[in-house]
Amino acid sequence: MQYPSLSPSLVRLVVSPDGELEDTAGGLTELRTGGHWYVLIDRDAKLAPEFESILQWEAANRPDVGIFYVDQELRAENSVDLRPDFDITMLLSHDYIGLPFAIHASALMRLGGLRSEMGAAASYDLLLRAVHAGIVIARIPQSLAWRERRQLQTSMQARRPALEAWLGNDREHFEIWQGLASTATQLRRRFDS
């Protein structure tokens, strides 16, 4: 699928810790379809002034992409938190993308928005559903967001319902285990009858 180029508006939506969407003024918001992009962002992250123009350029050159994510500056640590290119195996292991990310309005509407019942893992669940729906996810290899400190990883226990939903009917063929790190997950294939 190709996504239309950006309209003049870029809608910023705050994702609360419990997975609810809020507009930047703090009220709940209704999603609408169109040619615009939504930026899902947590309260601690800020976007670089050039975010919209670079997103517009990337979207024009990659009309197949429905979700873009970016690297982030960590001001208190005086470092950059680099994200690797999209890798489903890595995403299943842990939520390395986190927030913020931009999603085309038509992709967000197609996915039905965030599922707040997923709580802290609502944005992670949205990414898994995007993969399942065939929506292309890509990295913009630039530091276009910043925050004071590294965003905490969503725990494996919080992400477990999203993983189980993503596995769907194949869930019976897999075991979900704690990974080596406390926020990591292992999927183990069952080979029994």
Image: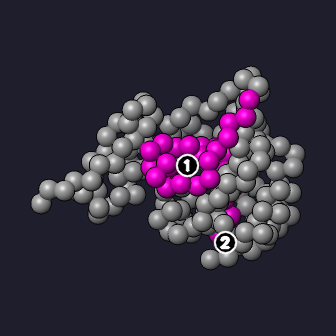
Q: Check residue 100 for magenta coloring.
A: yes
Snapshot colouring? one colour
Q: Which disc number belongs to residue 64? A: 2
Question: Which is more toward the observer, 116 or 38?
Answer: 38
Q: Amino acid at mark 2?
A: Asp
Q: Residue at x 77, y 43 (%)?
A: 143
Image height of 174 relative to 135, above or below: above
Q: Residue furthest top?
A: 76
The kind of secondary structure element at disc 1 is: helix
Q: Quadrant of residue 15?
A: top right
Q: Is residue 64 visible?
A: yes
Residue drawn at (57%, 31%) of the image: 152
The number of numbered badges drawn on the structure is 2
Which region shows up in magenta? 79-106
Q: Nearer the viewer, mark 1 or mark 2?
A: 2
Q: Which residue is mark 1?
A: 123
In percent of width and height, residue 99 lies at 64, 44
Q: Residue at x 52, y 69 (%)?
A: 134
Per the image, label 2 sits on a secondary structure element best described as loop
Judge whether residue 114 is colored magenta. no
* Residue 55 rendering spot, x and y as whole percentages: 79, 58
**Which quadrant of the figure contains the N terminus?**
bottom right
Q: Is residue 87 left or right of residue 172?
A: right
Amino acid at dot 1: Ser
Where residue 95 appears, x then y in whole percent? 52, 43
